Image: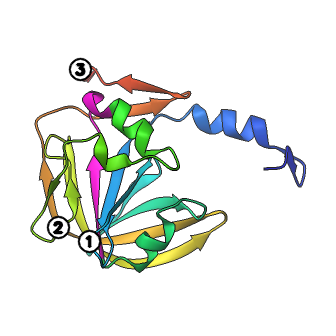
Amino acid sequence: MADQVQGLDVAAFRSALAQFPSGVTIVTTRGADGTPYGFTASSFAALSLDPPLILVCLDQGADCFPAFVAAEQFVVNIVTPGHATLAMKFATKGENKFAHGSFEPDENGHPVLPDAAAVIRCELEEAVPGGDHVILIGRVHDARIGGSRPVTWYRGNFLHLGESVA
């Protein structure tokens, strides 16, 4: 990546983005041959309640990119503090990612973290190019809440959420 993009200091931009705490997810799917694929994403958001849509952003250079844009379904696992090491592995290229987690297949064979803070299962509605990423828009067909609190990503580190202040 260049240090300057049309007058923008890229390092300053990255530092500014790091000031925004975000949730952490491990997004999973499986290929037509049953091979599991996954990546860590902090660019995840609700898009619509009616119809129920979410979005998650995937780097086009990710090893799993072809599998996700071809997938009919994917699962968003919202990470807990106990998944921090696993989330780092899913953010790394070349890792045998599924050797490290306690994933279980759902009824369609997609890998799910049974102890995730929440699990959201989606049909791929659309894949929209966005710079060096693609925005995967998922139509939610199932969501369940786990018993643990989620973890956030802030300034390059995991941050555990405490009690509500309000």
Question: Is residue 23 among what the camera can see?
Answer: no
**Residue at the spot 16% in from the left edge and 32% down from the top edge:** 148
Within the image, what quadrant is residue 74 found in? Answer: bottom left
Marks 3, 2: nearer the viewer: 2
Q: CA distance from mark 3 to mark 1?
A: 40 Å
Residue 82 painted magenta: yes
Residue type at numbered disc 2: Gly
Name which of mark 2 and mark 1 comes first in the sequence. Answer: 1
> Up-down: is 35 above or below 150?
below
Residue type at numbered disc 1: Gly
**Residue at the spot 27% in from the left edge and 20% down from the top edge:** 162
> For numbered disc 1, what is the local secondary structure?
loop
* Residue range of the region highlighted in magenta in the rendering: 73-83
In contact (CB < 8 Å): disc 2 and disc 1: yes
Within the image, what quadrant is residue 72 found in? Answer: bottom left
**Residue at the spot 31% in from the left edge and 65% down from the top edge:** 29
In contact (CB < 8 Å): disc 3 and disc 2: no
Residue 2 lies, in percent from the top left, at: 84, 49
Marks 3, 1: nearer the viewer: 1
Read off the residue under disc 2: 109
Mark 3 crowd level (few <14, some 14–19, many ≥20, 10 Å Cα): few
Read off the residue under disc 1: 34
Mark number, residue 163: 3
